[in-house]
């Protein structure tokens, strides 16, 4: 499970960086999205990959950290998803405005010949 998880993070991060280096602004925005997904998976994985653990403390089981899932990475990822969505929406609006003003969607504003 950990190897598959690490491979998914690596593929997402590599694809995101590759798209960030592309000359078109839409590809840059998609690359930022993929990179943010990779970071979210990484943060989520820091909370230990466990299946079937209780997210809250149950009085009968006692207070033992090994019996419960860590809620902090889950809350951080949820917050990052919301912020990432808002940032992507803002970048798309800026992309559309820049394309309307310049007539091109290249990062430097010039078409390559």
Image: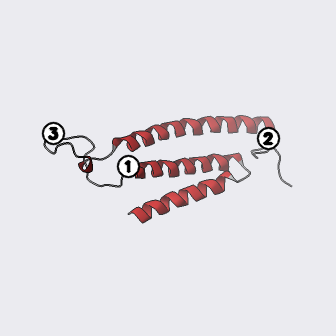
Q: Quadrant of residue 98?
A: top right
Residue at label 1?
A: 47
Of marks 2 and 1, the one in the foreground:
1
**Residue drawn at (49%, 40%), measured in percent from left and top?**
80
Give the quadrant of the N terminus: bottom left
For residue 15, side relative to residue 23 (left or right): left
For residue 73, side relative to residue 25 (left or right): left
Outermost residue toward the front in this view: 64
- What element does badge 2 sit on? loop
**Residue drawn at (61%, 50%), measured in percent from left and top?**
31
Graded by Cα atoms within 10 Å as few (under 14), some (14 to 19) or many (20 or more), the crowding at tag 2 reads: few
Counting residues from the start of the chain, the first of labels 2 and 3 encountered is 3
Q: Where is residue 55 in the image (x, y as percent from the top left)?
A: 28, 43
Q: Distance between the residues labelled 2 and 1?
A: 46 Å
**Residue drawn at (45%, 37%), measured in percent from left and top?**
79
* Relative height, residue 28 to residue 90 (above, below): below
Counting residues from the start of the chain, the first of labels 2 and 1 encountered is 1
Q: Residue 59 carries which label?
A: 3
Residue at label 2?
A: 103
Graded by Cα atoms within 10 Å as few (under 14), some (14 to 19) or many (20 or more), the crowding at tag 1 reads: some
Outermost residue toward the left in this view: 60
């Amino acid at each position: 499970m950990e190897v598959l998880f690490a491979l998914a993070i690596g593929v997402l991060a590599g694809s995101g960086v590759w798209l960030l280096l592309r000359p078109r602004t839409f590809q840059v925005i998609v690359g930022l999205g993929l990179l943010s997904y990779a970071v979210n998976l990484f943060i989520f994985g820091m909370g230990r990959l466990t299946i079937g653990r209780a997210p809250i403390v149950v009085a009968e089981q006692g207070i033992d950290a090994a019996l419960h899932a860590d809620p902090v990475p889950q809350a951080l990822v949820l917050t990052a998803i919301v912020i990432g969505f808002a940032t992507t929406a803002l970048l798309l609006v800026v992309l559309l405005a820049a394309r309307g003003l310049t007539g091109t969607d290249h990062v430097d504003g010039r078409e390559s010949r």
